[in-house]
Image (tube, rainbow, N blue to C red):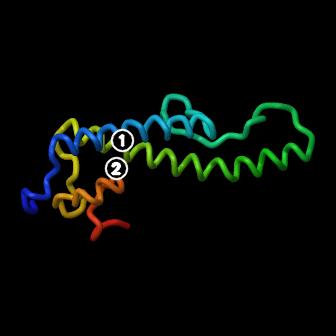
């Protein structure tokens, strides 16, 4: 592990937890606006606003365009949601802020920029 000076204080952890929880709420609102939960898996899928309605051909084209936008957006939001939930779980079990690749402490400035970061800058993909 790197120097103790780089460890986060409880105040910093509390601030980061608050930021993560606020972002989690925001991402969940975005997911609900652009997608729907798939059955028992809990996975999200993009949707169009008029899904399930009878449509004329121009509405069908609009629905396809909306789905083409929402599906990748929902995939990205779901990935971010997973990262946030994982970060909150790591806070609870005392492993928050450790790089998943090298197991070194992630610098506080990186966590301030991205509280759900899984890796240090050197191992960011």
Residue 8, placed above or below residue 51:
below
Number of numbered markers: 2
Q: Residue at 23%, 56% (x, y): give it.
A: 108
7 displayed left or right of 118: left
Of the pair 57 and 88, the residue shown nearer to us: 88
Instruction: Pick out the residue farthest to the bottom.
Output: 122
Q: If the image is split into quadrants, where does the C terminus sit?
A: bottom left
- Say which residue appears at 13% left-offset and 53% top-offset: 7
Front position in the image: 75 or 31: 31
**Label at residue 56:** none
Task: Give how far across and how far down residue 123 sits, in percent.
Answer: 29, 67
**Label 2's element?**
loop
73 sits to left or right of 118: right
Residue in the image at 78% along x and 35% along y: 50
Q: Mark 1 Cα within 10 Å, few/some/many (few <14, many 20+)?
A: many
Asked whether the residues under the numbered discs 2 and 1 touch, taking CB atoms below 8 Å apart as contact, a structural biologist would say yes
Position of the N terminus, as image quadrant, is bottom left
- The location of residue 87, given as percent across then percent down, is 30, 44
Query: Earlier along the polypeptide chain: callout 2 or callout 1?
Result: 1
Q: Secondary structure at mark 1?
A: helix
Which residue is the extreme one toward the top? 40
Residue assigned mark 1: 20
Residue 116 is marked as: 2
């Amino acid at each position: 592990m790197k120097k103790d000076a780089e460890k986060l204080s409880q105040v910093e952890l509390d601030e980061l937890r608050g930021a993560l929880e606020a972002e989690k709420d925001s991402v969940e609102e975005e997911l609900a606006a652009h997608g729907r939960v798939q059955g028992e898996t809990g996975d999200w899928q993009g949707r169009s606003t008029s899904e399930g309605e009878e449509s004329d051909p121009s509405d069908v084209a609009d629905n396809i365009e909306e789905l083409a936008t929402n599906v990748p957006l929902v995939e990205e939001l779901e990935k971010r949601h997973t990262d946030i939930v994982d970060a909150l779980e790591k806070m609870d079990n005392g492993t928050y802020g450790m790089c998943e690749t090298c197991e070194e402490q992630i610098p506080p400035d990186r966590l301030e920029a991205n509280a759900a970061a899984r890796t240090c800058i050197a191992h960011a993909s």
